[in-house]
Amino acid sequence: MNKPSKFALALAFAAVTASGVASAQTYPQTVDNWRNPFGNVWKNGTNELCWRDAFWTPATGIPGCDGVPVAQQKAKPAPMAAKVVFNADTFFDFDKSTLKPEGRQLLDQVAQQARGIELETIIAVGHTDSIGTDAYNQKLSERRAASVKAYLVSKGIDPNRIYTEGKGKKNPIASNKTKEGRAQNRRVEIEIVGSRK
């Protein structure tokens, strides 16, 4: 063999060897389960067992194949609800729907708590005592709930997450025959629904 043909043979051998190394580096096998050209693992007809090569161990297997455990996903925490009942006298003057400073301080705490969770919704329900007509008390309770919502929105709570409702004098929790009972019935119930971050 002459020199040029030996050189050509050596060059061809180097090219073949280099391409084999390059292809081995390009297509590393990270698991020992057989895959189709689309990267899916080959399984038997009942999808219970995966085809694997002779080097297979549970450490190199695919999760869910042949007893290799599937990583458990953390369950999303279930929403929790916290209901707080505030005496309306703390929030509002008698027959008014404008928030008093004491009420704003309490709502600051509610807003802080709501920002510390994955908030789903806040429900603010206004109630009144029995003094006045049904229609007037209904409107007053709605205005009070709307004042609570407006203040919480001013503190950065998404308005679409706050639901308001007025119940008027329909749901007393104490007797309206006494001054103390009427004071208990004038209230705002705030329910916060969400889950911990």
Image (tube, grey):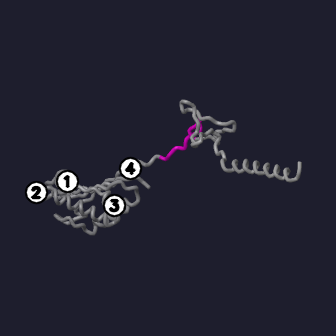
Q: Position of residue 18 (x, y in %)?
A: 75, 51
Nearer-N-terminus badge (2/1): 2
Nearer-N-terminus badge (4/2): 4
User: What distance separates the C-alpha of mark 4 from that of mark 2?
Assistant: 38 Å
Residue occupied by mark 2: 133
User: What distance separates the C-alpha of mark 2 from that of mark 1?
Assistant: 13 Å
Q: Specify the segment rendered in magenta.
A: 63-74
Figure quadrant of residue 197: bottom left
Q: Are marks 4 and 2 in contact (CB under 8 Å)?
A: no
Residue occupied by mark 3: 158
Q: Amino acid at mark 2?
A: Thr
Q: Position of residue 50 (x, y in %)?
A: 59, 35
User: What distance separates the C-alpha of mark 3 from that of mark 1?
Assistant: 23 Å
Residue 106 visible within the image:
no
Q: Is residue 52 magenta?
A: no
Q: Are marks 4 and 3 in contact (CB under 8 Å)?
A: no
User: What distance separates the C-alpha of mark 4 from that of mark 1?
Assistant: 25 Å
Q: Position of residue 37 (x, y in %)?
A: 59, 42
Q: Is residue 71 magenta?
A: yes
Residue occupied by mark 4: 79
**Pointer 4: residues within 10 angstroms few (<14), some, or many (20+)?**
some
Q: Amino acid at mark 4?
A: Pro
**Helix, strand or loop status at disc 3:** loop
On screen, residue 13 versus residue 52, left or right, reads: right
Residue occupied by mark 1: 167
Instruction: Point out the frontmost of discs 3 and 1.
Output: 3
Q: Are marks 2 and 3 in contact (CB under 8 Å)?
A: no
**Helix, strand or loop status at disc 2:** loop
**Pointer 3: residues within 10 angstroms few (<14), some, or many (20+)?**
some
Nearer-N-terminus badge (2/3): 2
Q: Residue at x 35, y 54 (%)?
A: 120
